[in-house]
Image (spheres, helix red, strand yellow):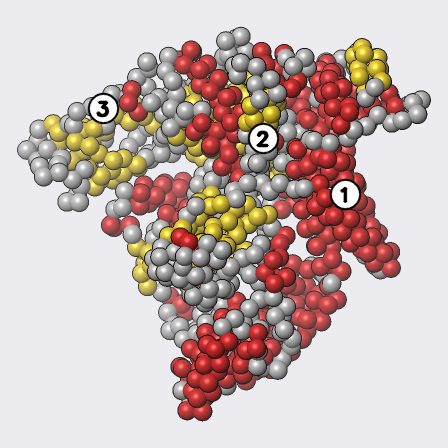
Amino acid sequence: MILPRIARAIEENPFYVLGVRPECTRQEFEREGQKLLSMLALDLAEVRTYNTPLGERTRTTELVRRSMAELREPSRRLLHEILAALPQSEIHTSQPTRPELDDRWVNAPALFGYGRFREGRQ
Amino acid sequence: MNDRPLYLGIDLGTTNSAASVFDGSLTHLVRTSQGTTLTPSVVRIDARGVITVGTKARRLLESDSDNVRCEFKRLMGTSQRLNFRASGKSLKPEELSAEILKSLRADVREQFGFEPAHAVISAPALFELPQSSATSEAARLAGFDRVELIQEPIASALAAGWTENASGAWMVYDLGGGTFDVSLLETRDGLLRVVGHDGDNFLGGRDFDWELVDLVLERLSSGRPRRLLRSDSQNAVAIRKLKLAVEEAKIELTRMGCTSILLPNLQFGDESVDVDIEVSREDVASRCTALVDRSVAVCLRLLKAQGQEPSKVTRIVLVGGPTAMPVVRQRLSETLGVPFAEGLDSMTLVAQGAALYAASANLDARPSARINPDKGRRIWLQYPAMTSDLSPYVVGRVSEESAPGPASIRFEREGWTSIETPVTKEGTFVASINILPHRANEFRILGTAKDGTDFPLWPSAITIIHGLSLSDPPLSRAIGVALASDRTHIYLERGSPLPARRTFLHEAVQTIIQGNDASVLRIPIVQGEFHKAHLCRLVGALEIRGSQLTASIPSGSSIEVTLAVDRGGRLSAQALTVSGQVFEEISHLLVPDVPAEVLDQAIRDLRKRLSLLFASAFRNKNQGSENTARLGGLELRLTEAERDAAAGRAGDADAAQKARRSLIDIDAELDGLEQEAQFPKLESQAVMELSMAMALVSIHGTPQERRLLEEAAASLEQVRKSRDVIEIQARIEQIQALCRAAFFRDPHAWEQIFKFAASRINSARDLPLARKLVDEGRGAMHRGDRETLIKCTKQLVTLIPFDTETRHLGHDSGLR
């Protein structure tokens, strides 16, 4: 099972978003990112989606910009390199159906008799 | 007019403004009719309503002070109007800024032969959203069709990077007339990246002037029965004259060791005083070192936030008039020890950088009508107008028409022709082209028809400049929406590359009745990094009024909110209701006005909190000395804010704004210290959460969740040792997330939530509906109908209101 945060890190891995290899140079991802931004601006069909180990995802200009910014930061890039290098078999596990975990249920366990009810709503 | 594109950059400064035009190879400073490159940001309106701008207006600042206004940049985005007595006119700060921009436009026309329609205007990096919005409005009023804003430090960096061609980490220290910005930058492989920035919107040369005014007043007061105060409204004219004199003295002291301030017959109330006071560099140093140190503290804070040491910074670029002061340079050398970049004009660097940025944004200053359209099939192109890449891509799309388009496209420049790039069935093409370094490269675009004949295209040429590639500027402060729970839902994190846009789904906490104007759903937009909404700055609000609705919005229904920020920091927002109505007008996009009594009350409250924290710090021997030092610093800042509030009461709107901002900052810091004082409480909460999570995860958790919980427990131990409040909160959230995941696997989880919500229906907003839901939920529980139970519970919870006080803290948000 993959926790949502990890799943998102895989889905939005800059190497997948930009379609470049983890060992690419800075100039390569800058050029590729620029090209993708130009193609998205003119709505070219072939760049609207990209492939990830979790399936096809939608590519947006925000995602491309964010990916380029992430790869410019050496420590952040390292993190993405590690994730991009994970064997596919480890990533390709089915996601369990998850309950809704929005803010409203943050205190749910407290109602179960644990802890106190926060947010000043008592 | 020149056939090649020209790019206009404007530095709209607090004290002086400047403009520069970039022609693809060189930047040219725009000269005023007096032949200078600086236009004082001063406006005069005489009795006939005639407007004078710049040097001429500045000359009359002293003798006609009721009709001359300066330093209005610091009031941009506020509702403060500035009066001109003789004409009876009252103008907003952006209207006055528009007059400066009109004057600069006229200078460009004089020198370059065309009236610019497009430009890039610089704004301080830490300008709040209303201030940026007011700058754009000023440009519109000045007659510009389109402007982009650029953060001042990025403009300086671009200009310095363009000139210097060096690499590594460096800093831009920009001390202007009214604002201070510092940026950490990195140039590598021709890419200029803003690593981060920080600043103080209310620290500038003007504050140095006020320090010197206070020094002179202190000397004049010595031996008098009554102190001469600048907060005394009777002294307003004398203070204005004195300020101009100290400003001149300050400039003289950049070249001389000592100078005199001579002002005969200065009228303080009913007393006439002859001012003849000698001021030395040492006097300036003794009064202004604290201000410089304040800027140094911001520099160090920036470096720390980016994990950098001053020793790793290769040089500092100094920008702004006050950086010429010896006390600034000396103190920076002593504290940071980083060499200064030499040979740059600190007064016009921002304008030059803005012009270079206009080129990279492909924003030709010439009016579109004057750029002759060629004959041919229209193509839309996307390419970097300025880049460090020698082989950039050009992407294009040919307009759709009934006749067939070109089969292929090629690009030509002197001595080089690209290969024929095929055009797809959809009319698109992607070509890689080759550019020459360090120059503007002009390419002709040539189309070829299916039969091999020429196919004319429009535009038929493009220009790509080889230079620095500018990475997307980072957002200076996080932007989000305040919720009714007083939490901040961060949409765009600090540092997000701009432009950026995010959408989230919320729920209305109240019903908005169609046709009722008093029924309003408010979506407050806040700036700041705090999880508590009331600690963030309210910068605007979307308001959905009942009178505008085509259908009522029931409590609990979805509202989709989108926030977007462009490269210059301008915000736009949109709310989409369930009925498909869109609301996008941001109201109250103003820096809020603060009445004097509110400031006074805030100061009293902060003093009280400060004294409680002092007492606690003295009691706690472990952290006592460190905390008392921090509290001491806050006490000084509070005293300074008190002084500004007093000046505000005497009519100085800028000082009142400064006090407001300082009080918010002090409030936030006190909150941090109070949180630190709560560490033992957080620690016990963490332990409690952990034990709760362990109980739930051991029963319902997956093996991975158990492993993650073990890791979280180990990490919590580390945090308990480091006593880091932010970190412990993050660990608590992590443990809570695991706890929630396990909790919801319990088959009785929803029953428990239902029972809890049902026990609170007396406070529900719609009691009959709440009762109906409770009945339905009970029935579902009895039948074992889980889906209906979940549906009822979710709806029931939305009917339980937030308490008024919490909602008020959340800027009266109507969302959860």
Residue B81 marker: 2
Residue at the (67%, 75%) spot, across then down: B688
The part of the image, by quadrant, that contains residue B195 is: top right
| In contact (CB < 8 Å): disc 2 and disc 1 | no
Q: Position of residue B654 (x, y in %)?
A: 66, 32
Looking at the image, is A101 positioned above or below residue B659?
below
Amino acid type of the residue tagged 3 in the rendering: Pro
Q: Position of residue B814 (x, y in %)?
A: 51, 59
The residue under the point 52% across, 71% down is B765
A76, A113: nearer the viewer: A113
Instruction: Left or right? Give the position of B379 relative to B312.
Output: left
Say whether marks 2 and 3 touch (CB < 8 Å): no
Do pointers 2 and 3 mark residues of a single chain?
yes
Mark 1 neighbour density, 10 Å: few (under 14) some (14–19) many (20 or more) = many
Q: Position of residue B463 (x, y in %)?
A: 32, 26
Q: Classify mark 2: residues with Cα within 10 Å, few (<14), some (14-19) or many (20+).
A: some
Which numbered disc flags the more N-terminal residue, 2 or 3?
2
Asked if labels 2 and 1 share a chain, the reply is: yes
Q: Please name the residue that numbered disc 3 is placed on.
A: B373
The label nearer to you, 2 versus 1, is: 2
Q: Residue at x 56, y 33 (%)?
A: B76
Circle 3 — which element? loop
Q: Secondary structure at mark 1?
A: helix
- Left or right position of B623 against B185: right
Question: Alpha-carbon distance for marks 1 and 3?
Answer: 60 Å
